[in-house]
Image (cartoon, helix red, strand yellow):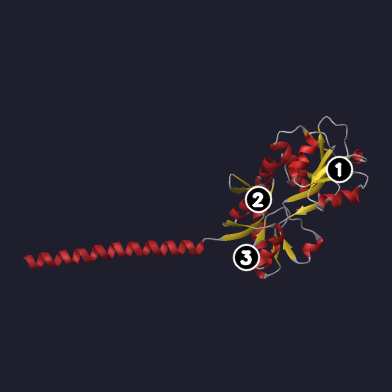
Amino acid sequence: MKKHHYGLWIIGVVVLLLIIGGGFFLTKGQAAQSAATTKTIKIATAGTIFPNAYKQNNKLTGYDVEVANAAAKTQGYTVKYVTTDFDGIFGQLDAGRVDTIANDIGATAQRKEKYLFSTPYNNETTNIAVRKNASYQQLKDLEGKTVATSGAGNNFITSLQKYDPKINIKVFETRDQAIQALKTGRVEGLLYSRGTLSAIAKYQHLDWRVVKGNAASALVAFPFKNSQEGKKTQEIFNRGLKKIKSNGQLDKISTKYFGYAITNVISKSGGK
């Protein structure tokens, strides 16, 4: 009788171990399957350009970042960011370390010779902001006046010089210095993109307005390697961008950062 009970006890322990072990291996199997189905897109950014991609409280944020996150999410992907100096940002893409770039990248004709691009999600125009009570209404009204910007040789300087060389440009080392120049009246305007100017005025509560007219315009999009893998990622982003445009999420993000809906701005510029 004792042997019978002892045998039943051993069988019970074995069964219990099998149940626990089976559950353990099932959990491991489920975890492995979940890990295998996790889809991640790697994106490079300098993380230093407000309001497109910058760090706030040590967290990466900005218009381009939120657009990339939203577009990827609609297709079931998560995003992992790789921060790098802008000078080497395309090198990250060329080497296959990242799948694309989120850093206010203009889809220029020269870049299109080498890279694939998503449908545009921004239209970067070259504009000038002035104090709200200033008399200037259009770019031409600033002929003979001085406007501030930062970074010698930036695209906005080149664009404005081509558009109207009679407008003087004072280049400061940093953006904050250029902003202060307009705040203190040392210059008559501030030269950047419309989105950047609107964001600066919004976030710093400045009584400024952007005068009418653009010196230049460039559609902004996500670039990809011209390869099979690049084409696959391009399609993922195009589907995602189409989704967030149609459901109003893109306009919601642009209004958050720029203070205006971007969809109509893109459409008027020829972007889809």
Q: CA distance from mark 1 to mark 3?
A: 40 Å
User: What residue is shown at x 81% (from left), y 61% (from top)?
Assistant: 109
The answer to whether residue 59 is visible is yes
Residue at image point 58% right, 47% down: 58
The type of residue carrying mark 3 is Arg
**Amino acid residing under circle 1:** Gly
In primary-sequence order, the first of circles 1 and 3 is: 3
Local crowd size for mark 2, using a 10 Å CA cut-off: few (<14), some (14–19), many (≥20): many
Q: Is residue 15 left or right of residue 125?
A: left
Q: Which mark is residue 197?
A: none
Where is residue 264? Give x, y as percent: 76, 45
User: Which residue is the extreme one toward the left?
Assistant: 1
Q: Which mark is residue 67?
A: 2
- As drawn, the label of residue 97 is 3
Name the quadrant containing residue 194.
top right
**Residue farthest top in this picture:** 133
Q: Amino acid at mark 2?
A: Val
Q: Which residue is mark 1?
A: 213
Local crowd at mark 3 within 10 Å, few (<14), some, or many (≥20)?
Answer: few
Whether pointer 1 and pointer 2 mark residues with C-beta atoms closer than 8 Å, the reply is no
Q: Position of residue 240 (x, y in %)?
A: 64, 55
For the point 79% across and 59% down, the residue is: 108
Mark 2, secondary structure of its residue: helix
Query: Farthest residue toward the front?
Result: 173
**The quarter of the displayed image where residue 1 is located:** bottom left
> Could you tell me residue 10's position as x and y percent?
17, 66
